[in-house]
Image (tube, grey):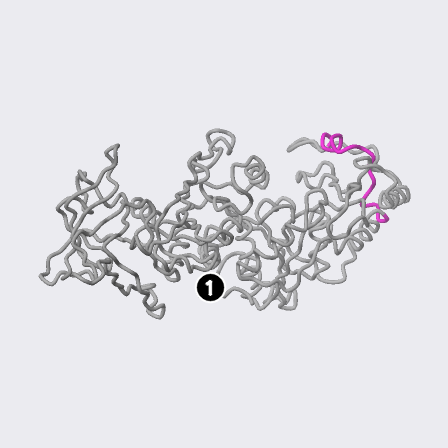
């Protein structure tokens, strides 16, 4: 099953190009895309844009999108990453037409390489990588031909076969395409096609000791699969002439695929560089690739970001050719909007303060009476029904909801002021209990039994409604609060290195939180709204651990409103 296509019509340069191809019958009105990640790490929010783009385009045009693992670097790729990529794509709501590996095509790629050698369009170079790089020249400076560039085709073919047979050590030789060392496009300056690496591969084992480069494997893999439109992020724009050159010089069985580039996604306060993300993990700055502060899909999933919100955000920002940085607050607005519709409401007190109702009744045995109030599970969806919350004379409220000496414009509970307890009664504080250090540890109050359900029969009003939990029935929970992992809007922009902008206070762990009993039944991974506080996700592994997904305040809307003034 694939994710639903957004109702809004999609019109952009990619879809326009596909429509033109269909009108001209370029591919027989067939549309096939692919998502080709390298399995050397976990997918992040940037990959999500490519996933939504490739799968979304294919579905809109009644086509198919394959998952192709671009596994041409055996030293960095692992089965763990392969499995995680498959799982993340499924979580986002997409099902590939087929799942394949670039390594599935190694034999065909090699045969095509021999073809180019035989045609005098590729040669074996005996120089090391550093020397080859130095000979490339620079922009406006032509490169220098390799002394092996005019090596006879028969000799290069013999060496290539011996490279495959494992006769030579790593780095001693490579296969290069013979194009133009003076080309303005640097990628056309005799790019490397194969390098020697005596390393075991997660998919092919020890079958190969030469491995294709990305540029050699990419377009040819597209052609083998029958891809019609190869949708890539914008950094591959400069690679397109090489992509086309290879395809034009090969005996393809079918149509030549077409590469189209689009802008990648960047978010403020975020880095998506695999190198930097890996450093965060290896240096212990985060707890792992699925840490809820990470921009990986696994981290976002743990934090409670809904897959639907990610898809909707990617669709809303559209497809352009201009790279830009999107505000993370804009993304969070989509998360908040989705959760407002779907999340169950619950009451949780994160920093508890005891509230004792001194006039609360007792039963015939002298035990405090327990009442139950019906409250809505989700006011946005009546079908979610009501739940019963226990209420007694001993409660917990938030510490911030009481002030012995209130600051200006403070409307919550203070001495001799009446407030409403959500769905229950009006209460008025009359005294406090303090510890030896003078800190208030308990508030003494009375309740008005005539205000059951939250309204006063005489019509009097209060200026604040507060959440609460019954102390006798409360469950203990641990709650993790998050701030930005990077304090700078654009990490590294001013300091020169993104890691210098790490926020040392990106996480706060609260223990001893008091929550209503229903929260103990929250399924792992589900997100609920803690009333007046925010949206929180139940940890998938640890019971009664909740991660704050996003607060209730729409920061993006506030920014937009401010910008209009």
Q: Nearer the viewer, residue 291 or 370?
A: 370
SS class of the residue under badge 1?
loop
Q: Nearer the viewer, residue 285 or 64?
A: 285
Left or right: where 511 falls relative to 21: left
Q: Quadrant for residue 313, please give it.
A: bottom left
The x, y position of residue 102, in whole percent, is: 71, 53
The reply to whether the magenta stretch includes residue 119 is yes
The reply to whether the magenta stretch includes residue 274 is no
Q: Is residue 447 above or below residue 409?
A: below
The x, y position of residue 365, in whole percent, is: 23, 61
Left or right: where 335 falls relative to 195: left
Residue under the point 19% across and 60% down: 454
In the rendered structure, which segment of residues is drawn in magenta? 118-135
The x, y position of residue 532, in whole percent, is: 30, 52
Identify the residue under disc 1: 6
Question: Among all residues in the image, which is located at the extreme left?
Answer: 458
Q: Nearer the viewer, residue 328 or 429?
A: 429
The x, y position of residue 419, in whole percent, is: 18, 52
């Amino acid at each position: 099953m694939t994710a639903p296509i957004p109702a809004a019509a999609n019109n952009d340069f990619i879809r326009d190009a596909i429509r033109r191809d269909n009108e001209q019958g370029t591919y027989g009105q067939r549309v096939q895309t692919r998502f080709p990640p390298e399995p050397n790490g976990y997918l992040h929010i940037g990959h999500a844009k490519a996933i939504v783009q490739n799968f979304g385009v294919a579905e809109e045009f009644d086509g198919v999108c394959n998952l192709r693992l671009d596994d041409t670097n055996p030293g960095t790729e692992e089965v763990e990453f392969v499995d995680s990529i498959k799982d993340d794509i499924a979580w986002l709501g997409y099902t590939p037409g087929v799942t394949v590996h670039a390594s599935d095509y190694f034999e065909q790629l090699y045969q095509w390489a021999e073809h180019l050698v035989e045609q005098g369009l590729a040669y074996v170079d005996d120089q090391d990588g550093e020397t080859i790089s130095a000979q490339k020249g620079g922009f406006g400076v032509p490169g220098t031909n390799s002394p092996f560039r005019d090596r006879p085709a028969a000799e290069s073919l013999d060496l290539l076969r011996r490279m495959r047979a494992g006769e030579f050590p790593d780095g001693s030789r490579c296969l290069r395409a013979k194009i133009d060392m003076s080309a303005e496009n640097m990628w056309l300056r005799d790019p490397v096609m194969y390098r020697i690496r005596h390393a075991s591969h997660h998919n092919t084992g020890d079958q190969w000791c030469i491995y294709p480069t990305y540029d050699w494997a990419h377009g040819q893999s597209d052609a083998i699969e029958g891809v019609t439109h190869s949708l890539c992020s914008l950094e591959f724009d400069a690679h397109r002439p090489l992509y086309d050159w290879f395809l034009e010089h090969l005996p393809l069985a079918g149509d030549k695929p077409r590469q189209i580039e689009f802008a990648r996604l960047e978010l403020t306060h975020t880095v998506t560089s695999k190198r930097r993300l890996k450093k965060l993990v290896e240096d212990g700055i985060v707890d792992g690739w699925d840490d809820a502060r990470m921009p990986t899909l696994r981290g976002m999933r743990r934090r409670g970001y809904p897959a639907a919100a990610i898809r909707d955000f990617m669709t809303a920002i559209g497809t352009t050719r201009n790279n830009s940085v999107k505000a993370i607050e804009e993304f969070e607005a989509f998360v908040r909007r989705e959760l407002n519709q779907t999340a169950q409401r619950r009451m949780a007190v994160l920093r508890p303060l005891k509230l004792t109702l001194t006039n609360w009744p007792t039963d015939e045995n002298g035990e405090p009476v327990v009442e139950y109030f019906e409250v809505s599970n989700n006011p946005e969806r009546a079908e979610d029904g009501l739940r019963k919350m226990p209420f007694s004379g001993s409660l917990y409220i938030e510490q911030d909801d009481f002030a012995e000496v209130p600051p200006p414009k403070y409307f919550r509970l203070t001495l001799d002021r009446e407030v409403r307890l959500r769905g229950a009664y009006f209460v008025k504080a009359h005294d406090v209990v303090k510890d030896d250090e003078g800190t208030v540890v308990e508030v003494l109050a009375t309740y008005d039994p005539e205000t059951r359900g939250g309204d006063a029969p005489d019509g009097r009003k209060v200026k604040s409604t507060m959440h609460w939990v019954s102390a006798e029935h409360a469950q203990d929970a641990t709650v993790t609060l998050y701030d930005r992992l990077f304090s700078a809007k654009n990490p590294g922009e001013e300091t020169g290195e993104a890691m210098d902008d790490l926020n040392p206070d990106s996480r706060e762990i609260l223990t001893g939180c008091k929550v209503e009993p229903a929260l103990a039944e929250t399924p792992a991974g589900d997100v609920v709204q803690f009333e007046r506080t925010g949206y929180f996700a139940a940890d998938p592994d640890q019971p009664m651990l909740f991660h704050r997904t996003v607060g209730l305040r729409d920061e993006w809307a506030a920014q937009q409103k401010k910008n209009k003034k």
